[in-house]
């Protein structure tokens, strides 16, 4: 069996990793730096992943979501939890052996994702019946708890979902409803999040989809205002550095915009800037200048995303004025040291208003164009400690 | 090459020819993966990447979603690779194609058109939102690239006066078609990237929809689809060499090595260009497809038709 084991280890030498990061940003950065260093790809979905890496302490709902997520991974699969930045490398070193160890146990009874989902939400039939957001588990009775984002139409959509055409395998069928052009089209309840590529962990966007147009959009953090737990070694001093935060936001935006090469370059610049070594920092600055120049000069990017998520001149609710491209350019400027990063947290209600009636691709770009991960969570973090 | 036997099935026997062509197709796909990996993540580990990745997916369990359309989903995952292999049948290997008909170019186009069904079903099969959106995106993309691709293929056939691939290669003894058909050459390569939904045309499998049509695939089915995409890209590079770059023509070296060299060169150019730009949103470039590419390829065909009438290619 030794030959078999060695073959398995060889085949699993470059596992795909699904990153869940409920913890501080600096911890996620350390995890991403380590994955990039090893050239281990970040998985796009549970089906694509061998490893779930949980960076930080998940809150109760996120924790339940990770359980569902784990049950959706094909075997062999491994979950690792990391809460110290300097621990990431060591934990990843053990992953290949751990995968090879469990690779023989394909027949072991697995947790059923649907059963796990029902545990999270026994009564609300329409709330979880989709695979749009991998591993979404709604909070109990959360429908009443979002009055604070009122005035953006985020509750307007609920009445029309009453007539779903029954269930298949426990999932609600798509019903029909008039779309934005007045046509009767299939409409499907979906939730995106709380874990998606280049998406703030714990954020859930729910709504109704017709084709790929999203209506009745609502945004919420599944773990509410729970602050990420403080951890002594997470590199807090770097967490707020504007150039690093901007490069991080830019890397995520570029990934959502489908430019993996540029996203990787932005991450590499970010890793270098966070280094303790003076020479690396200097190289990081040069790399940041190069990647932001590439982004600003890209005619394809301009043509592809211009006009999406336009605030029509009004900045507010923590969302800088302009369209998604303007906000990406703004990060380029911040990364180059030209501007301070926005300090006001983006308001989820305002953001939900912006994604209302947009296509899925546009909605993802809009969410990726504001720094929710840092702004909202960071602000709550600050409040919790004041 | 003996001029009378243009089909390798006739020259070497059916089974050996099929095996050789299939192996060449897989090798071309692997080569493309290596070149692409170098562009995205650097040289480290790129050489072994296709083999290691295949091994990983073979070890992996197949996973299903609740209430999938099993039959159509599985058919679709197998179809991507099968269609890529079948399109290789009309690409010359060592001067001969696996089978040679009077309509090779139509065959190539037909295999690629069947990708519409395969990728749509791939999106439909798992009964999942992201996957379905990926399927829709592929159809939108198809509307943009299909007609320009057909005109590009037909232009090469028009210049050669035959739809037989070996005939098109032979017609370029004097002058490579890329000289008089630059637009058709570029459109052909861009369309190849589009029907393999790769690079700037990867919206159907985009990160913004968690991998889209491939988001729910695991194990051997993911392997079939990913291999199919890679083989399609490798095969298209080889086909571009045959249609526009004179096939195996070149001084000193034997035909096959020229063909390989040119194919690698086309892959390098394709990857270098494709990875420089972000994903293009299908709803934006459908407009370009119809307003720019269709007229451009039509004018290209018209110019070639006039050159044929004036005896330029004779």
Image: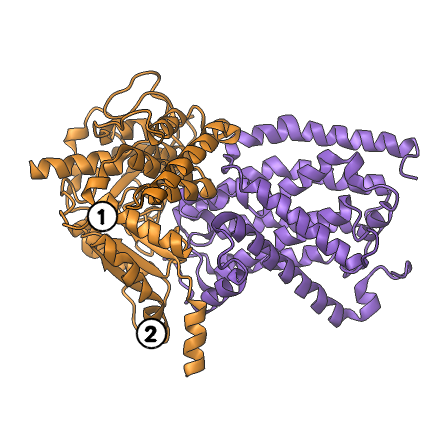
Chain colours: A orange, B purple
Above or below for A126 versus A240: below
Above or below for B45 versus A233: below
Picture quadrant where residue A160 is located: top left
Above or below for B99 versus A261: below
Specify which label sits upstream in the sequence, 1 or 2.
Answer: 1
Which quarter of the rendered picture does the C terminus of chain A lie within? top left
* Position in image of residue A368 (x %, y %): 34, 35
Q: Secondary structure at mark 1?
A: loop
- Name the one closer to the observer, A208 or B19: B19
Please give the label number shown on residue A101.
Answer: 2
* Left or right: residue B96 compared with residue B36: right
* Position in image of residue B56 (x %, y %): 45, 65
Other residues around mark 1 within 10 Å, as few (<14) / some (14–19) / many (≥20): many
Above or below for A370 versus A27: above
- Name the one closer to the observer, A127 or A374: A374
Q: Chain of mark 1?
A: A
Residue name at image x 22 percent, y 36 percent: A240
* Position in image of residue A293 (x %, y %): 45, 30
* Left or right: residue A289 compared with residue B229: left
Dot 1 corresponds to which residue?
A22
Other residues around mark 2 within 10 Å, as few (<14) / some (14–19) / many (≥20): some
Residue A176 visible, this angle: no
């Amino acid at each position: 069996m030794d030959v078999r084991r060695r073959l398995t280890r060889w085949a699993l030498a470059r596992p795909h990793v699904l990153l869940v990061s409920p913890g501080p940003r600096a911890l996620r950065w350390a995890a991403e730096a380590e994955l990039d260093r090893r050239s281990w790809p970040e998985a796009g979905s549970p089906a694509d992943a061998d490893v779930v890496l949980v960076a930080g302490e998940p809150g109760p709902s996120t924790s339940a979501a990770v359980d569902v997520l784990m049950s959706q991974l094909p075997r062999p699969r491994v979950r690792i939890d990391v809460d110290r930045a300097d621990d990431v490398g060591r934990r990843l070193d053990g992953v290949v052996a751990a995968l090879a160890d469990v690779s023989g146990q394909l027949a072991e009874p697995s947790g059923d994702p649907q059963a796990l989902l029902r545990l999270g939400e026994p009564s609300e039939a329409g709330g979880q019946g989709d695979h749009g957001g991998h591993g979404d588990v709604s909070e109990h009775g959360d429908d009443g708890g979002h009055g604070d984002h009122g005035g953006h139409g985020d509750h307007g959509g609920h009445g029309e979902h009453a007539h779903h055409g029954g269930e298949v395998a426990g999932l609600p069928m798509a019903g029909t409803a008039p779309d934005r052009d007045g046509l009767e089209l299939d409409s499907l309840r979906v939730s995106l999040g709380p874990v998606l590529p280049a998406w703030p962990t714990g954020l859930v966007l729910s709504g109704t989809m017709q084709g790929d147009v999203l209506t009745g959009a609502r945004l919420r953090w599944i773990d509410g205002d729970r602050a990420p737990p403080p951890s002594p070694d997470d590199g807090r001093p770097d967490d707020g550095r504007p150039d690093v935060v901007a490069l991080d936001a830019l890397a995520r935006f570029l990934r959502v915009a489908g430019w993996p090469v540029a996203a990787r370059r932005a991450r590499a610049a970010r890793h270098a800037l966070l280094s303790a070594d003076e020479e690396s920092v200097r190289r990081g600055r040069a790399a940041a200048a190069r990647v932001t120049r590439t982004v600003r000069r890209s005619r394809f990017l301009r043509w592809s995303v211009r006009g999406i998520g336009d605030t029509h001149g009004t900045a507010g609710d923590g969302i800088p004025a302009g369209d998604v491209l303007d906000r990406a350019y703004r990060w380029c400027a911040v990364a180059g040291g030209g501007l301070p990063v926005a300090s006001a947290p983006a308001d989820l209600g305002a953001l939900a208003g912006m994604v209302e009636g947009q296509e899925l691709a546009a909605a993802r770009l809009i969410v990726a164009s504001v720094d929710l991960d840092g702004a909202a969570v960071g602000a709550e973090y600050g409040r919790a400690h004041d | 090459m003996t001029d009378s036997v243009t089909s390798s099935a006739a020259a070497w026997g059916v089974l050996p020819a099929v095996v050789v062509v299939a192996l060449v197709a897989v090798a071309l796909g692997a080569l493309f993966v290596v070149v692409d990996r170098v562009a995205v993540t650097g040289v480290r580990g790129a050489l072994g990447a296709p083999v290691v990745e295949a091994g990983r997916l073979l070890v992996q369990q197949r996973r299903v979603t609740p209430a999938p359309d099993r039959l159509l989903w599985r058919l679709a995952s197998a179809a991507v690779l099968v269609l890529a292999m079948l399109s290789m049948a009309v690409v010359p290997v060592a001067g001969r194609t696996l089978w040679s008909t009077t309509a090779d170019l139509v065959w190539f186009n037909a295999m690629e058109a069947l990708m519409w069904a395969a990728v749509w079903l791939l999106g439909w099969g798992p009964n999942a939102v992201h996957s379905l959106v990926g399927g829709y995106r592929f159809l939108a993309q198809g509307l943009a690239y299909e007609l320009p691709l057909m005109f590009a293929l037909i232009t090469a056939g028009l210049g050669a006066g035959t739809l037989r691939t070996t005939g098109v290669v032979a017609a370029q003894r004097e002058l490579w078609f890329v000289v008089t058909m630059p637009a058709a050459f570029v459109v052909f390569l861009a369309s190849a990237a589009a029907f393999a939904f790769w690079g700037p045309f990867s919206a159907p499998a985009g990160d913004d929809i968690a991998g889209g049509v491939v988001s729910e695939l695991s194990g051997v089915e993911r392997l079939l689809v990913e291999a199919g995409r890679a083989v399609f890209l490798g095969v298209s590079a080889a086909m571009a060499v045959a249609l526009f770059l004179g096939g195996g023509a070149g001084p000193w070296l034997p035909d096959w090595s020229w063909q390989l060299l040119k194919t690698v060169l086309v892959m390098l150019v394709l990857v270098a260009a494709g990875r420089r730009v972000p994903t293009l949103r299908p709803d934006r470039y459908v407009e370009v497809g119809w307003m720019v590419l269709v007229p451009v390829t039509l004018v290209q065909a018209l110019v070639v038709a006039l050159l044929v009438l004036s005896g330029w290619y004779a």
